[in-house]
Image (cartoon, rainbow, N blue to C red):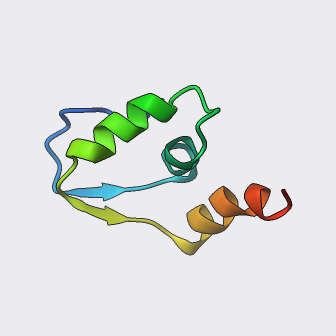
């Protein structure tokens, strides 16, 4: 599985749970990679309610 594939050249990006969590959570192993990718990304992010709920839920109980 590829997470945060820099240089993909896409204008729209479907954001699934993995990269979303890696972007928000500094302890995730792909955090820096995702931060670097999204810093330069100029397209449109598309996601689903399920991906957002799955990504945010673990942080609500902290």
Q: Seen from this angle, which residue lies furthest bottom? A: 49
Identify the residue shown where x is 31% and y is 33%.
5
- Taking depth in this image into account, of 52 and 35 the one nearest to the observer is 35
Q: Is residue 38 above or below residue 29?
A: below
Identify the residue shown where x is 20% and y is 37%.
8
- Classify residue 36 by image quadrant: top left
45 left or right of 16? Answer: left
12 left or right of 27? Answer: left
Identify the residue shown where x is 75% and y is 57%.
59
- Taking depth in this image into account, of 54 and 41 the one nearest to the observer is 41
Q: Is residue 40 above or below residue 47?
A: above
Q: Quarter of the image containing the C terminus? A: bottom right
Residue 2 seen from this side: no
Q: Seen from this angle, which residue lies furthest top? A: 29
Residue 58 percent across, percent down from the top left? 77, 55
Residue 20 percent across, percent down from the top left? 51, 51
Q: Seen from this angle, which residue lies furthest right? A: 61
């Amino acid at each position: 599985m590829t997470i945060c594939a820099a240089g993909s050249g896409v204008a729209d990006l479907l954001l699934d749970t993995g990269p979303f969590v890696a972007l928000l959570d500094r302890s995730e192993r792909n955090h820096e990679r995702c931060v670097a990718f999204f810093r330069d990304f100029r397209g449109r992010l598309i996601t689903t309610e399920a991906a957002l709920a799955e990504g945010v839920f673990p942080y609500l109980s902290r």
